[in-house]
Amino acid sequence: MFKRGKIQISDHFNGKKFFNPGGASDHSFKDFIKIAKEIQRAPWPKWVDLDLFPKPKDRVVEGLEYSIVNHSTILIQTEGLNILTDPVYAERVSPVTFAGPKRVHRPGIAFNDLPAIDVVLVSHNHYDHLDIKTLIQLEKKFKPLFLTSLGNEKLLRKNGLSQVEEFDWWETSTVAVANNKSNLRIHFVPAQHFSSRGLHDRNRTLWGGFVIESKTEKIYFGGDTGYGTFFKEVSERLGAMTLSFIPIGAYEPRWFMKPVHMNPEDAVLAHVDLKSKKSVGIHFGCFKLTSEAIHDPIEHLKQGCQKYGVSSDDFYAPEFGRVYRL
């Protein structure tokens, strides 16, 4: 486990705050007022019923299986390990329980149907990715290893999480695999985004994605990000991805969202840059965060794939709760 001291100044940390190299800029207060009005334009349904699927296996020793719970919460099962990304089981993604974006469908896998979780990946501290109540539930039930970005360990430990490691970009954790001579290597990789949980902590913690590397697969999880050259750098440094989970939602209006959220066309470019064999769309269809309609990400992903000659079998939007096997 890392024993983190003072965070070093780097190309994305100035000694006080983190930033995006090359320049995705912050918006003004007036921009936030304007976007708050625009988000209301596309109506979403109050509730969507999901199809019921069999619950996942307890363990997957051979091969790889995955299920999208909701938003960016993914159950990844490989090498006998169960990994959960950005777990959110809250009704709202907000600092308060009475206001803020509210889910429009139940989680695709009920919390009590989750298999024993070994590792939890937390990409950054926004409420739709770091849901502290869900993390506390996971700690109480499973006591997993929590891997997260620089600056978040303090929050997690303050809330009783016992095994926490935080990472800078390109740092790696090795996770032991029981009854297996090889270990999983989990790399924390760059993203283009920002962080905050309140009014006075903007960019005090880092953001990023993860690459899970086993003896046979490389699995990319994008967290939350705009498009940038770092996707090519990931594949150049770590090799072509076997499977990528790439955000495709929360992208309109583009004047506001482009620096920090990809649209589906950007996501297809990321798929190409990652040299990904298969990619799965995430970060859509559960919480109304921006101004596109609920089904727009799925339709626009199909259009993006057609534009860049990517098969819909190679990059698709999944059904929530369905178990997929690679």
Image (cartoon, rainbow, N blue to C red):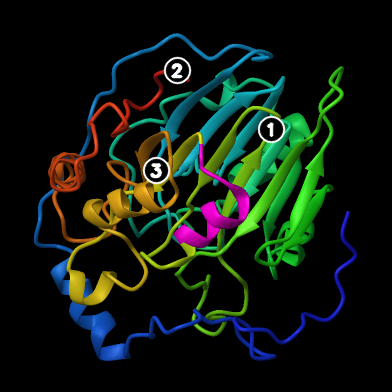
Label 1 SS:
loop
Q: Nearer the viewer, mark 1 or mark 3?
A: 1
| Residue 237 is one of the magenta-drawn residues | yes
Mark 2–mark 3 Cα distance, whole angstroms, equals 16 Å
Which amino acid type is marked by label 1? Ser
Label 3 SS:
loop
Principal secondary structure, stretch drawn in magenta: helix
User: Viewer-proximal residue, 96 or 54?
Assistant: 54
Residue 244: horizontal and vertical position, in percent? 46, 40
The span shown in magenta is: 231-241
Q: Which mark is residue 214?
A: 1
**Do the CB atoms of the residues marked 1 and 3 lie less than 8 Å apart?**
no
**Residue at (55, 27) in percent of width and height:** 111
From this view, report whether residue 302 is shown above or below residue 210.
above
Q: Which mark is residue 323?
A: 2
Quadrant position of residue 140: top right
User: Viewer-proximal residue, 86 or 307?
Assistant: 307
Q: Crowding near pointer 1: few (<14 within 10 Å), some, many (20+)?
A: some
User: Viewer-proximal residue, 160 or 97?
Assistant: 160
Q: Which mark is residue 71?
A: 3
Q: Taking the image as drawn, is residue 159 in sight?
A: no
Quadrant position of residue 280: top left
Label 2 SS:
loop
Mark 1–mark 2 Cα distance, whole angstroms, equals 20 Å
| Residue 145 is one of the magenta-drawn residues | no
Q: Which mark is residue 289?
A: none
Residue 9: horizontal and vertical position, in percent? 71, 87
